[in-house]
Image (tube, coloured by chain):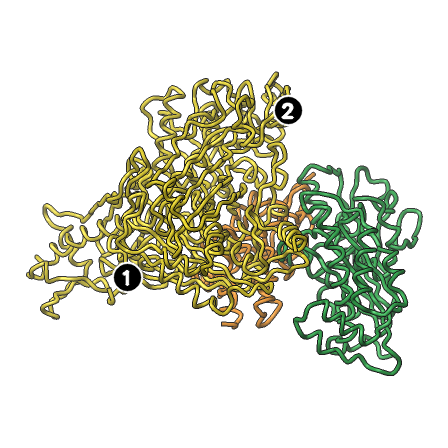
Amino acid sequence: MNNLTTVGQKIPKRDAPPKVIGAAVYIQDMKVPGMLHGKILYSKHAHARILKLDTSKAEKLAGVRAVITAADMPATFRIGVMKDNPPLKAGKVLSIRDEIAAVAATSPEIAEEALSLIEVEYEVLPGIFDPVEAMKEGAMLVHEETKSNVLKMPWKLVCGDVETAKKESAFIVEDTFSTPWVTHCCLGTSGCIAQFDTKNNLTMYSNTQIPSLAQNDYIDALNAFGLKNRRARIIQCTIGGGFGSKLDTYSYEYIAIMLALKTRKPVKIVFSREEEFFATSPRQCTITKISHGCDKEGRLTFREIEMILDNGAYTSWGATTPSVMMLPISSLYKVPNVKYTAKCVYTNNTYSQAMRGYGNPQATFAIESSLDQLAEVAGIDPYELRLKNANEPGELTPQNFKITSCGMKECMDEVVKRLDWKGKHGKGTGRGVGMASLIHVGGGARVYKSDGCGTIIKMDDFGKVDVFTGASDIGQGSDTIVAQIVAEVLGIPIDDVNVINNDTDICPWDVGVHASRTTFVAGNSALGAALKIKSQILEVAAKLLEEDPATLDIKNGVVFSTKNNEKTTPLGKALRKVHYALGGNMLMAEYFYDPPNANFDKEFKGNLSVSYAYGAHGVEVEVDKETGQVKILDYIAAHDVGKAINPLLLEGQIYGGGLQGIGYALGEKMVYEKGELKNGNFLDYKIPTAKDIPPVQAVIVETDEKDGPFGAKGIGEPGLVPTAPAIANAIYDAVGIRIKDLPITPEKVLKALKEKEKKG
Amino acid sequence: MKKEIIFTLNGEAVNVEVDVQWTLLYLLREVLEMTGTKEGCGYGECGACTVIIDGQAINSCLYPVMEAEGKTITTIEGLASKDGQLHPLQTAFINDGAVQCGFCTPGMIMSAKALLDAKDKPTEEEIKDAVAGNLCRCTGYVKIIDAIKTVAGGR
Amino acid sequence: MATLDGAQYIAGGTDVMVLIRQKKVNPKNLISIRNIKDLAYIDTAKGLKFGAATTHSDIDGHEIIKRAYSALTDATSHLGSWQIRNVATVGGNICTAAPSADTACPLLVLDAMVSIIGPKGSRDVALDDFFQGPGKTALGQGELVRGFVIPAFGENTGSAYIKHTRRQAMDLPILGVATRITISVKSGSEVRCKDMFCTIDSIANILAKLKDEELKVEDARIAMGVVAPTPVRAKKAEAALKGKIVSPELFEEIGNIAASEAKPRDSIRGEAWYRSEMIKVLVKRALIKSIDRIIRPDEAIYPERLW
């Protein structure tokens, strides 16, 4: 481990050079000859009957090549995890982002004009916008064909016996917390180009995070459109940000496909910033009732949580976030008895999907805020309470997670040390400190039938390598990590490694960039393929050098004998020798790594991941008691990452995730009024600017995960999981008020301060 | 209505017919096919479209194309030298980990360049002020500021 | 120009181009005044005169304005982003006449006069009378703002503008407060508490120490933004300040009077009750900042003319 030359180094990201000269091609920049431009007409109302939809004027506009409505799609075709979402809506619109028509034209301006010529007559219906109201007996049904607005989702987790544990608890706290819709704000908006060949095989230029699964989705669509047995190829452009926003396939993609089919031309749809705000799916909002108990010594006895999730009008991944929320609920700290139920409720609001953390930030906000409340009632310092209940290596959690490496205590220690916790906590002078920890999957996550990733490696004649990986790089640097691992194993300079990842015709299967799995899974996959090809190389070189392959190794592109320094051969020479010969061969190897994790059983128990990522965040804040504004004076983000394959990229994930977390905690909220988004622009939806960053320390803790590539675990999502509760806890320490509803705005703080003053 | 304008772009004279309703961003991306400058919002709220005009960092999405007449304009494509040698800012962004998805990068670099051209050894506050109008969702800005400091001599 | 059909003036374009893109306006013609030299001048010989097409960056970089008309620089340096400030003009900011226009409150407290030119000749209007409603000004058909005229203020005058925002850049104010204050010190003595402004002491304590100094308010202006349909002066509060000795009690009272002169409303950018509360806080803070600038001016400015 100590002799690593590439792994562990701060290697600059391989795809940075084209990006800094403006040469990287994003979907916005992509052009295909003969391409048409597609635009979508959205509903004007959150709930209405469509009485008339007349596209005739739009069709006649010069430059328009096709106008489609639901009538052009198979009537039963549905998308989304519950298959309740038709890409184009007919009859009724159930939310204000419902797509009701689309146009393909020779320019975006003509397409836009054509939209304004489509005549729609609505009969506006009363809408239901509150999930609590929508759950009630007799509430108006959002989907008429269902019996209830509560989705048939199985979210229930029971570990141990909570009722008995309650009776045996010395201290109990109970409270309700809520989190809003927030959105990804990728600088590069959503978009695709759909193109058919003469045999009706589809090519999608896309910035999806799930190329292999999207392929399945598109093939299903083609089948539904009457095109059986066709191929779908996905070519990913440079992706301008993901954060989970591209984890599902959306209406606009199927609309582009249908328009391409109708016009027999490639059709490009790219979202404007307005569309990116109101027509993409935000982070799942939550209402969480939580209760925690502990014994006299502060050992946790139980955790009980009930959640209500506003599912919106249709279903995407927001409805499955409870499966990830279960992670911290069952396994953040040692809690022997756990009960969790979550209800997803249809309303006429927008619908949610994956966003970095996938439910974990929402659940951890409630859990870690509640834990501080418990600490106060029990008279124990919040850090001491956490330490007492900290997870440890070798533990089996109530949800049957096998904890292997675990740096939770080390991370909390770092926070406490660097913040001067003992010196600053409990002063209540307007300045205070707070902390919160996290658990997340760090070794893949078996959320599907496969959690695998394939890698193919081929050598050329000179010692250079092409690596085809299923893993997509969404900007986090997975290409660089894969290159580092291959370069390390093969003993060649990293510049000799070329990573190809963006074409499903060429690259192997991968379930997708999610669950912070890429370093672990794609890394292990690349590691496996590299080891395979290394043994092939050494076999070949052994013949050349007349040595036992077991005594050979490669360094700096030269194969050498560990027994005899004189015996060396450049890698290229060995490759040419085996290629340019009668019956020759070119070296290639493949390896499909599917982590030895487990699907949940019917009770949601099972070792979801091979390893788990831990971390702790600590914050020092100052509260302006006159204005309610919260200033972050210091921020410590400590993360157990197993092994930092690339500390430069890793820090980037911690800083980036952390600032998204700060935005979530202090300022971001999508403001809806009767289902309509009111702040869908960068002025009124405020993500942090460069002037908003607090002093931040990213602390990397390495616990050497034995199943991870070179000991590594995931980091993609943990960066923003504990941010909000750490800040809420610090504010409580500073001024004695607790905000339980994100974001923590100056108004909420001031109101709470005034109420506290009134109470005396 | 179409008119002809002449201006200097990345050191070269450009003579082009434009529709007076275009923005400079539209001309750059759709007509001159220089897609390095990005459209992130179209409202001057994100800075992804930042170019340098007569030494000032400006949002090209709000800049009427006719105003370009007679101006000296630099885009991201004009930063590296003709023989491909990167500008120190470009090298620093690569080496200091300031690039993740890269969509904000061209605009960010142009704002930084405008700052360094106008000010020798800017303070950290001045650097933050200069890029406050360039939104980034990936990096958390820390390494971007580091990269600019590397070139400004503050590290 | 007065006869050009469906025409609209455009300077920096940061408002007009946005309105066009949002399809809120659709002018057939745009008349660019960005490059007209007659509209972009800064003259600090006697008082301050500057042209409507002066950009926020132009004002930002001007040392004399920063020192003698600080509230204006507070506004121009915090507006939007650097890219916006490089092209957005103060004239544009005022003529768009949003209740949140950052330069409005500073110019109000600096007693600015608006110089207007048009097809019927030129006229001057006090900025106080220039705003007539959200987005509405006193400009008639074809008229243009030529520039602004601000009087010279004496030694013991300081001004400040506080923009209350949710983030540190690229933000519209939840509300904004500008103040200008002229004080006189008890005859003969010098203000002894200068050092106290260097501390991070609470405002209440600073004010208590100031009370001992017996600083008398000779004149004052207070202007508030985003708490009424237009930027407004808190004239009752101003009158209540005049002739009084600076003290915590006085500032508390003034904050309350100013809040009573405002009519804030709920919007997605802020709630009315919060805006009311913040008037009280920000009026105090802006006045203290203004006094701070009198007592501890930055290094001496070399005047443009010695006589």
Q: Residues within 10 Å of mark 1 (few under 14, many from 20)?
A: some
Return the residue nearer the eye: A237 or A95: A95
Residue at 45% in and 61% down: A381
Measured as percent of width and height from the top left, residue A48 is found at 60, 22
Tags 2 and 1 both on a single chain: yes
Counting the numbered discs, the total is: 2
Q: Which residue is mark 1?
A: A493
Measured as percent of width and height from the top left, residue C20 is found at 70, 40
SS label for mark 1: loop
Residue at 75% in and 78% down: C193
Question: What kind of residue is marked 2?
Answer: Leu
Q: Quadrant of residue A199?
A: top left
Palette colour of chain C: green
Mark identifier at residue A117: 2
Measured as percent of width and height from the top left, residue C286 is found at 76, 63
SS label for mark 2: loop
Residue at 50% in and 37% down: A281
Relative vertical location of residue C262 with respect to residue A697 in this rendering, above or below: above
Measured as percent of width and height from the top left, residue A425 is found at 51, 64
Mark identifier at residue A298: none
What chain does badge 2 belong to? A
The chain coloured yellow in the image: A
Return the residue nearer the eye: A465 or A80: A80
Mark 2 or mark 1: name the one nearer the start of the chain: 2
For residue C41, say whether it is visible. Answer: no
What chain does badge 1 belong to? A
Q: Is residue A270 left or right of residue A560?
A: right
Mark 2 vs mark 1, CA separation in Å: 59 Å
Palette colour of chain B: orange
Return the residue nearer the eye: C62 or A195: C62
